[in-house]
Amino acid sequence: MSLNPDTQAFVDMIEAARASAPPVAEQTPEFARNRYRALAHVLGEGPELAGGIEELEIPRPGGSIGLRLYRPEKEGPHPVLLFFHGGGFVIGDLETHDKECRLLCERADCAVLAVDYRLAPEAKFPAAVEDAWTALSWVVEHGQTVGIDTSRVAVGGDSAGGNLAAVVALMARDAGIELKLQMLVYPATDASRHFDSFDENVDGPLLTVEVINWFWGHYIGQNAGERERGDWRFSPAKASSHSGVAKAYIATCSADPLRDEGNAYASLLDQSGVPVQHSMFEGEPHTLFQLFNTSESAKTLINECAKALAEAMK
């Protein structure tokens, strides 16, 4: 599938750099994490924030969770986006998505609270879900102590982070927590793999099916069967009901293996009576969300996310 020219130029550079890397199956999680951090560095920095950035730590059973709070310039209390980074539940951290959190904070005039959830294989499924829910619960119960308006909370993320946001939105509905928005950027929503985009984009730029298999193996196990893959905490599309969840902004990309499950999730929410804004980015791959400094489509994506956030928080 052909890509838009500005994206293709960046993909060519990244693919050339990857040529010297070991085959995916031979890579360790730490090797992949370091390469992802290096990619994020190449993609540039985000804006300085007049409201400042604060590092936080909250308790969880058996340990703690790191959070990073980005504040807008205006006086609080601030509405907040609880943000979960992508990376297949194996790679990614607060640094790899720092630029995107800064941009959303600045453009939506909304605080962003990024969650440094546990990664696999050190912490397998459902550890990331547990941390995501702990973070949301803390925001609702204690957010006011750091200047957060706990009546205006949204969740969001890209890829695996979009999966966590979708799952937490379902959990919030069941717990009686009213979220203002779920912002899902090319989310992983259905592990059944019956989608054409897995075949069409099997060797997709920046995310291949081989890499997805590597992520899944570390997170849920190489031998996970239909029952494990169908757990709604891993495949939120498999939840028994989607009515009553927060309204959604969903973005998908045509050259992404996850395209069709994201499209299907948008349709599923719509059919369940949930207001949905869905944008499909033609000629664009997975990882578009992080290409703000190199792609016009990425600028549009970030701006749409920020606009959806700002409108939801009114």
Image: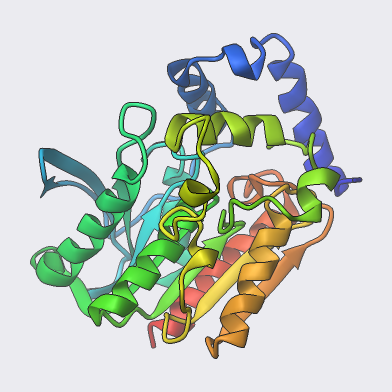
Vertical arrangement, residue 182 with respect to residue 28, above or below: below
Which sits in the foreground, 81 or 258? 258
The image position of residue 102, as x and y in percent, is 42, 53
Vertical arrangement, residue 202 with respect to residue 136, above or below: above
In this picture, residue 65 sits left or right of residue 171: left
Which corner quadrant of the image does residue 16 belong to? top right
User: In the image, what residue occupies the spot 52% across and 36% down?
Assistant: 216
Where's the C terminus, which quadrant?
A: bottom left
User: In the image, what residue occupies the spot 38% across and 27% down?
Assistant: 121
The image position of residue 108, as x and y in percent, is 45, 71
Whether residue 77 is visible, yes or no, is no
The image position of residue 200, as x and y in percent, is 85, 46
Which sits in the foreground, 29 or 223? 223
Extreme right residue here? 2
Instruction: Count the marks.
Output: 0
User: In the image, what residue occupies the spot 45% across and 50% down?
Assistant: 47
Where's the N terminus, which quadrant?
A: top right
Which corner quadrant of the image does residue 73 belong to? bottom left
In this picture, residue 46 sits left or right of residue 135: right
User: In the image, what residue occupies the spot 20% across and 76% down?
Assistant: 150
Which corner quadrant of the image does residue 249 belong to? bottom right
Vertical arrangement, residue 279 with respect to residue 91, above or below: below
The image position of residue 27, as x and y in percent, is 55, 14
Whether residue 137 is visible, yes or no, is yes
